[in-house]
């Protein structure tokens, strides 16, 4: 977030999917001990049945939680955090790390 990046562990949470930060890196790829390690940032993403999910997204840089949307296709995941009832969204494209 805001120049840094992280590995997020995506796991089932009930019938939904949740994700927590497990490692963090500076923009140049140098690992660092972020205070955000362990924080859940993907919250209750419930499947819609068509490869898309709806839940919440927490943004550590500003401490706010947004309406979340997620779409999975193979090893790619598109995550969106939205305001104004989903009319204005910011998105990130994530790739599965083996």
Image: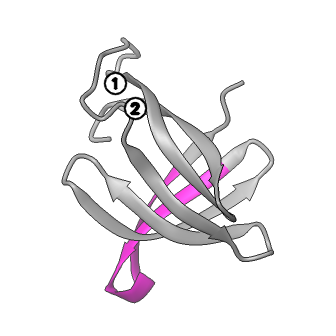
Q: Residue at x 39, y 73 (%)?
A: 82
Report x, y in % for residue 48. 72, 77
User: SS of the residue at dot 2?
Assistant: strand
> Which region of the structure is painted magenta?
77-92
30, above or below 95, in the image: above
Residue 38: % across, % down: 39, 34
- Left or right of 77, for residue 90: left
User: Which disc is residue 52 wearing?
Assistant: none
> Which of 85/55 is in front?
55
Pointers 1 and 2 in contact (C-beta within 8 Å): yes
Instruction: Identify whether 97 is placed above or below 49.
Output: above
User: Image height check: is 52 above or below 92?
Assistant: below
Compared across the picture, whether 49 is left or right of 55 comes to right
Q: Residue furthest top?
A: 30
Give residue 73's position: percent from left, percent from top. Answer: 77, 54
Q: Is residue 81 magenta?
A: yes
Quarter holding the N terminus is top left
What whole-number distance in Å separates the C-alpha atoms at marks 1 and 2? 7 Å
* Residue of label 2: 5
Residue in view at x 69 percent, y 69 percent: 52
* Numbered-mark total: 2
Residue 22: x percent and y percent?
A: 46, 28
State the residue position of label 1.
27
Neighbour tally class for label 1: few under 14, some 14-19, many 20 plus, Cα within 10 Å: few
Q: Which residue is at a point 54% across and 64% down the rendered structure image? A: 44
Left or right for 77, reference 20: right
Q: Give residue 57's quadrant in the image.
A: bottom left
Res 98 → quadrant: top right
Residue sitting at x 45%, y 67%: 56
């Amino acid at each position: 977030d805001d120049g840094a990046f992280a590995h997020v562990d995506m796991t089932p949470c009930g019938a939904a999917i949740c994700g927590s930060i497990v490692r963090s890196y500076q923009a140049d790829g140098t690992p660092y001990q972020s205070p955000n390690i362990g924080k859940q940032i993907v919250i209750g993403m419930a499947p819609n049945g068509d490869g898309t999910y709806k839940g919440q997204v927490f943004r550590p840089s500003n401490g706010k939680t947004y309406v979340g949307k997620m779409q999975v296709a193979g090893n790619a995941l598109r995550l969106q955090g939205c305001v104004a009832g989903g009319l204005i969204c910011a998105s990130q494209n994530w790739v599965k790390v083996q």
